[in-house]
Every structure is written in structure tokens, then in C-alpha cells.
Image (cartoon, rainbow, N blue to C red):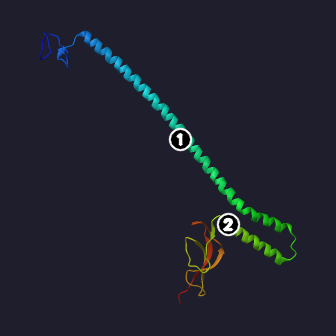
Amino acid sequence: MARGNGKSEGNPVELDPEHELPASEDTQDIASSSVSSGQDAELDKLKTERDSLIDRLARLQAEFENARKRTTREQQEFREYAVADALKALLPTLDSFERALQTSASDKSEFRGGVELIYKQLQDALVKLGLRPIPAKGEPFDPHLHQAIEMVDTKEAEDHHVLEELQRGYKLKDRLLRPSMVRVARNPKH
């Protein structure tokens, strides 16, 4: 057997790289057959892996969709619970108004006293829910808390201080719900 360049007279011959011997045709058939079956096994393995990954992806997408729906449902339930809690705090005030309207108060001062009591009851319920009135009259004008409706030239109050509150403003905890509508003093320069 020839060693060296691996060629015999006239026909190029492939060398077996491991042994540097020319490969016979039988060896080539067996090698291509084993490569073919090896490729089939690899292909089957890749198909199985792909199918497994597709199935896993489908399951993860379904889990994500279920989690999104559950979160949306829980948020809605929380909102409904919060509204129910707020309304429950206001029910005693509603009851007091109904009782006041059912009585025949011939004395106006007695009727006024009842309305003032109901107003106090309503304020207490709103304070428990976190509502706080914004102080305005006599305070320095703050554009974050007050909405100036009018500037009034006067020397009776300090410059840029609230002269009069036209509508009370409120905060819910630290969040502004509604600014106070106010008249603001402006000291004329003379």
C-alpha cells in the first residue's frame, strides 16, 4: 500500500485521516450509512427538543395570560372593596339625614342644630377615610393648593395672601383632590 500523497496511477484516492490509508468503497458505504443514521438520530432529537420547547412556550403563555386575568380581577375586587368601605363610613350620615327629614321641626334653631350635627358626622367620616381640608384664609397663596379666582387690591391683608375662600379645597392623604378657590390680596404700590 502506498503512503505519501495517497494517489495511485490515474485515480485519486481518499485517505482515511486516522490511519492515512486509502478507504475502500465498502468503508465509505458503511460510513455514509452511519452518518445518515447519526443525522437521523440528531434530527429526531432536535425535533423532540423543538416540540418540547413549543409545548413549554404554550404553557408559559397560558400561565402569563391567567396571571394577567387574575391580577385584573384582583384590582377590580380591591376597587370595589375600597368603594364599599367608603360608602359604609358614610351610611350613618345618610341615616341621620333621613331621620332629620322625617321629623317635623317647627323650631328652626332645633332643625339647624340637627343639620350641624349631621355636617359634623359627615366630616368625621371623611376624615377617617383620609380626607383633609386645605387651609386657605389668611394663608400665603400657594398655586399648588389654591386656585386664584380674583386678585383684590387691599391693604387689609398681606400681599399674596388668601383674602377669602370661595370653595374649600381637599387633599386625600397627601394627594390634592381639589384646589381651594380663593380671592388673593394684592397690595397696591403707592
Residue 129: give x, y in percent of width and height: 65, 64
Q: Is residue 147 above or below residue 90?
A: below
Say which quarter of the image contains residue 118.
bottom right
- The residue type indicated by label 1 comes to Phe
Q: Is residue 94 above or below residue 139?
A: above
Residue 15: give x, y in percent of width and height: 19, 16
| N-terminal-most mark, 1 or 2 | 1
Residue 104: give x, y in percent of width and height: 88, 71
The residue nearer to you, when weighing 139 against 186, is 139
The residue nearer to you, when weighing 157 against 5, is 5
- Point out which mark residue 85 bears: none
| Crowding near the residue tagged with mark 1, few <14, some 14–19, many ≥20 C-alpha atoms within 10 Å | few
The residue nearer to you, when weighing 52 against 188, is 52
Say which quarter of the image contains residue 116.
bottom right
- Point out which mark residue 126 bears: 2
- The residue type indicated by label 2 comes to Leu
Q: Is residue 13 left or right of residue 172?
A: left
| Crowding near the residue tagged with mark 2, few <14, some 14–19, many ≥20 C-alpha atoms within 10 Å | some
Label 1 SS: helix
Quadrant in the picture for the N terminus? top left
Q: Which residue is mark 1?
A: 64
